Amino acid sequence: MKKLPQRTCIGCNTQKLKKDLIRIVKDKDGNINIDRTGKMNGRGAYLCKNKECLEKAIKSKKIEKIFEMKIDEKVYEELMKMYN
């Protein structure tokens, strides 16, 4: 039986199946994107499809720490739209 890939949510620190998480990617040019396919090139971070996890990650600036850069408010707004 094939092992399914798991990733850790940066909001709640729990491991879940990769397909159950939202991937945020920093590409080589330093742009932050939401990867809906899970196949974009670049450094990735994962969030549960749970609004509380997103709010925790924003409040603790976890996304900024992982990507080592300031995150534009537009990225957070786009993420918030996905949870509504």
Image (cartoon, grey):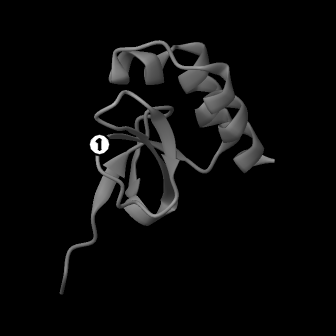
Name the amino acid type tagged 1. Answer: Gly
Q: Residue at x 44, y 17 (%)?
A: 64
In percent of width and height, residue 74 lies at 68, 28
* Direction from residue 12 to residue 6 in the image, left or right: left
Q: Is residue 76 above or below residue 58?
A: below
The quarter in which the N terminus is drawn is: bottom left
Question: Which residue in the rendered view is the most extreme toward the front?
Answer: 29
Question: Which residue in the rendered view is the most extreme toward the right?
Answer: 84
- Residue 3, picture quadrant: bottom left
Which residue is at the front of the view, 77 or 21? 77
Residue to which mark 1 is pinned: 42
Q: Is residue 34 above or below residue 27?
A: below
Could you tell me which secondary element the residue under label 1 belongs to?
A: loop
In percent of width and height, residue 35 lies at 48, 52
* Direction from residue 58 to residue 35 in the image, left or right: left
Q: Is residue 37 above or below residue 11?
A: below
**Dot 1 surroundings within 10 Å: few (below 14), some, or many (20 or more)?**
some
Q: Is residue 84 above or below residue 2?
A: above
Q: Residue at x 40, y 60 (%)?
A: 38
Q: Residue at x 40, y 14 (%)?
A: 69
